[in-house]
Image: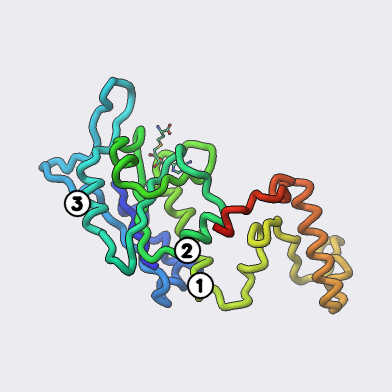
Amino acid sequence: MRVNIITIFPHLFDHVFDFGMIQQARKKELLQIEIVDLRDFTEDKRRTVDDRPYGGGDGMVLKPEPIFLAVESLAGNVADPQHVVLLTPQGELFDQSAANRLSLRRNLTMICGRYEGVDQRVTDHLVDQEISIGDFVLSGGEYAALVIVDAVSRVIPGVVAKGGSVLQESFMDGLLDYPHYTRPPDFRGWQVPEVLLSGDHSEIARWRERQALELTRLRRPDLLNPGKNAKDTE
Ligand code: SAH
């Protein structure tokens, strides 16, 4: 999978993809990340990417021309068509099923907004999908792009060995995760639950399932609501 990130702050990404699972995915060449400097697609001496909003108001707006040129320079081919995402609080909320679906794309381009956002013509005529990572306002789309690359890269087929832990985690089965313990069995008088030391695998599996269900019921009853994951089967 190839991910292109269009940004006015390319150096923000200098080291962030050099660790952990993302680094592994890149080493295995299951993931290629290209950082694209929006200013490389400007035509004036000052490399201007923003301008004042029509109609007035505070803040600047990212101009359409450089964004169109940048996206067009990354155009995919018939086999790997480019999927263009704009990061914006107005977008559809990102969740695990959105991550799963994006992980099937071969050529994903993300446009990072800054200031007051981007010219609406980008949204209307260039973008395939608008995504928000939550109901809060960031200072730039770069942080949202990071979150998305991380969530997507760990579900790219082959990144985690088959049967690995990714499949047993929160949200994969529509539930929150169960509690995890490691050694020592007694830490400052706090014991690891007996059942986990028992070696009885079916009993352990039942305990974990009960814990996951209980926690979900308590904290996120919305996840138990049938129909919520309908888009998974799209
Ligand atoms: N004026 C805009 C906020 C702009 S914030 C508004 O009120 O909606 C600057 C940039 O940060 C946005 O263009 C977008 O790319 C990014 N951004 C901010 N919050 C975000 C969120 N919740 N999800 C994804 N991107 C976000």
Q: How is the image coloured?
A: rainbow
Task: Give the secondary structure at mark 3.
Answer: helix
| Residues at circles 1 and 2 in contact by the CB criterion of under 8 Å | yes
* Residue picked out by circle 2: 103
Horizontal side, residue 188 vs residue 117: left or right: right
Q: In the image, what residue occupies the spot 19% across and 49% down?
A: 41
- For the residues bearing labels 3 and 1, Cβ distance under 8 angstroms: no
Q: Callout 1: few (<14), some (14-19), or many (20+) C-alpha neighbours within 10 Å?
A: some
Residue that lies at the very extreme toward the front in this rendered image: 234
Q: Quadrant of the N terminus?
A: bottom left
Along the polypeptide, which appears first: circle 1 or circle 2? Answer: 2
Q: Earlier in the sequence, mark 3 or mark 1?
A: 3
Any mark on residue 40, and which? 3
**Residue pictured at 36% horizontal, 68% vertical:** 32
The amino acid sitting under disc 1 is: Pro
- Looking at the image, which is closer to me, 127 or 135? 127
Among numbered discs 2 and 3, the one appearing first in the sequence: 3
- SS at badge 2: loop
Which image quadrant is residue 28 in? bottom left
- The quadrant in which residue 116 appears is top left
- Closest to the observer, 16 or 140: 140
* Label 1 sits on residue: 157
Q: Residue at x 52, y 54 (%)?
A: 98
Tag nearer the camera, 2 or 3: 2
Three-letter amino acid code at disc 2? Answer: Ser
Which amino acid, mark 3? Asp
Question: How far is mark 2 from mark 3, CA to CA?
Answer: 28 Å
- Gap between marks 1 and 2, in whole Å? 8 Å
